Amino acid sequence: MQNDPAGASLTIDRVAHRYGNAVALEQISLSVAGGELVSLLGPSGCGKTTLLRIIGGFIAQSAGRILIDGQSVDRQPPNKRTVGIVFQNYALFPHMTVAANIAYGLEARGQTRSVIQARVNEMLALVRLGHLADRMPRALSGGQQQRVALARALAVRPSILLLDEPFAALDKNLRLDMQIEVKRIQRLSGTTTILVTHDQEEALSLSDRIAVLNQGRLEQLAEPSTIYDRPASLFVNTFVGSTNILPGVLVSATAESAVVALDGGGHIRTRAPTPVQGQAAIPGDAVVACVRPEHLRIVDDEAGLHGTVEMGLPLGATIVHELRTATGASIKIAEPRGVGALPRPPGARVTLQAVSPDSINVFKPAA
Amino acid sequence: MHRQEGLEALGFRIVMWGLAALSFVLLLAPSLVVVVVSFTSGYSLKFPPPGYSFRWYVSLLDAWQLQFAAGNSLEIAAATTALSVLLGVPAALAIARSPTARARALDSLFMSPLVLPALSFGLASLMFFSLIGLPVSPLTLVIGHVVVCVPYVMRTTIASVAQLEFSLLESSASLGASRWYTFRRITLPLIRPGILAGAFIAFMSSFDNVPVSLFLRDARTDMLPIRMWQDLEGKLDVSIAAVSGVMIVVTLSLMILMERVAGLSRRLR
């Protein structure tokens, strides 16, 4: 590919947006390096689509700036921004063949016929659809339509590529194939890419970094493993992956670790409380300890959390148990499953321990 | 129990098929009768005809008054259609894309000629034109026809613009296309079937319009439907049946053509 392997950088500088009186985005700042793939992840209504449309130039933000390679694009309409977009429904032009769809942007920019022909062939090869060049979009499968949409957007060498829930319309098996395909094409073209999604697995598997949005606020911007292991807020911890929330009171805390007295009885050693908006919990505060199912083990020891098995599910590679504690709270545990291992019967009394204090995050509960 | 349901279903089917057959007969029989009569060898509109011939079709070749009226009607219909498309399509584009109450009000206003009695509109426009000093002429006739025909163009165009996915236009813009380029390459090709369907209906509706033509025509603009009525009233002329036969055949051919190029029946749903 002849694209600049570095790609263009994107800076979102204190961008805020409101629809009438409703705040859609509160002062979001984030920088995306050239060639990077960053996901905007969040539940519906979190503002991720609004932010995408602001970057594309389809909505003018109420405040803040959008910079591409350091240059403000706020005054540029969508057709001057060189920001490519792939919509959830692909938005292929229904009256044009695959090749004509891919050629469209080049024609709109007044390229010569020979340049267009060469670029279209190059893009068809990139998305491996050379044999379908003369098909109409309606004669293509969902995955093929998506690849055409991607080829069409990349043909004009956009400085930024926006993907708006691009996998939502695909069935599960195809989705995984297309995620690999999109990642491959994005790597090859070196195009800086923003992916909007509500699917955490998609964000975790595809992104260089993930920006988790909630109610118009940026909760955390970090690498996928950091998002998963070191969530910056209770929201991030519960939205990404599954987690057990154990309420309690903070007993003591150092810079490295802490002890929480659980409402369900017993003490657990945890990571130091995670500060949210600069404020960390201090001893005596009500807190929640968050521990993921795969970070818990059923042990023969007496020390630990006690519970009764409600249900056990052997899921092939893992065994999942759902327990109920003395306070009635439910806890999920996922353990690797050995050959022939069976789940424990309902009603069995068991003891739980965390794999390591470092895997338990402590937050102040949501106000 | 099962048997009773079977009987009920059978009864339902018999009634529905009966109603469908009845409507079919009522819709088609008059046209069939007129076509059959047009091939009569006799001198009256009697059905069934005493014998068959092409004589009345041949007689049309010499019927200069009918030819003159048909020529007028075609010219007026063509001008009306062109003007309706030129005015109706931009109006439809603006109205279809605007969510405001003002756009809804304009929509209803432009559609009102479809519901208001065309006779009162014909009289009103005659009074209006004489008030502003515009003599009755082909121009006033075309203006009158446009008012009653433009709703058809607008209706079908608005429907096709409403079906146009907004993300297509946004994709086009993100690919670097200007608004005008997007309109030419995306919007227009996708709404063209709707415009064609509307233009076709506008043409047909202008071609056999009587109420507006009654008030706004003059000697130079003798219109075919009115000429046919006068001939029939005065002379009980069988050549009028032949004219009807020609019109039915032409209309059917045009409808088949429009079905092929514009998917007419889908546009009218």
Image (cartoon, rainbow, N blue to C red):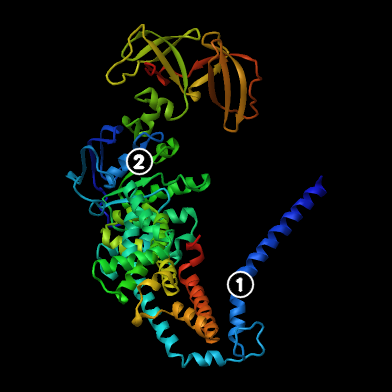
* On screen, residue A79 above or below B86: above
Contact, mark 2 vs mark 1 (Cβ under 8 Å): no
Give the x, y percent position of residue A257: 36, 13
Q: Can the viewer see residue A95 in this picture? A: no
Quadrant that contains the C terminus of chain A: top left
Q: Which residue is mark 2?
A: A49
Which secondary structure lies at badge 2? helix
For the residue marked with disc 1, what is the amino acid?
Answer: Leu
Image side of residue B181 versus residue A323, left or right: left
Residue A89 image label = none
Quadrant that contains the N terminus of chain A: bottom left
Q: Which residue is mark 1?
A: B28
Q: How many marks?
A: 2
Q: Can the viewer see residue A16 in this picture? A: yes
Dot 2: chain letter: A
Quadrant position of residue A277: top left
For the residue marked with disc 2, what is the amino acid?
Answer: Thr
* On screen, residue B137 above or below A249: below
Dot 1: chain letter: B
Residue drawn at x 23%, y 70% as measured from the top left: B133
Give the x, y percent position of residue B168: 37, 55
Residue A122 vs residue A324, the one in the foreground: A324
Residue drawn at x 29%, y 32% as measured from the top left: A21
Image side of residue A198 versus residue B127, left or right: right
Q: Residue furthest left?
A: A71
Give the x, y percent position of residue A68: 21, 45
Q: Nearer the viewer, mark 2 or mark 1?
A: 1
Which secondary structure lies at badge 1? helix
Crowd band around label 2 with a 10 angstrom C-alpha radius: few (<14), some (14–19), many (20+) = many
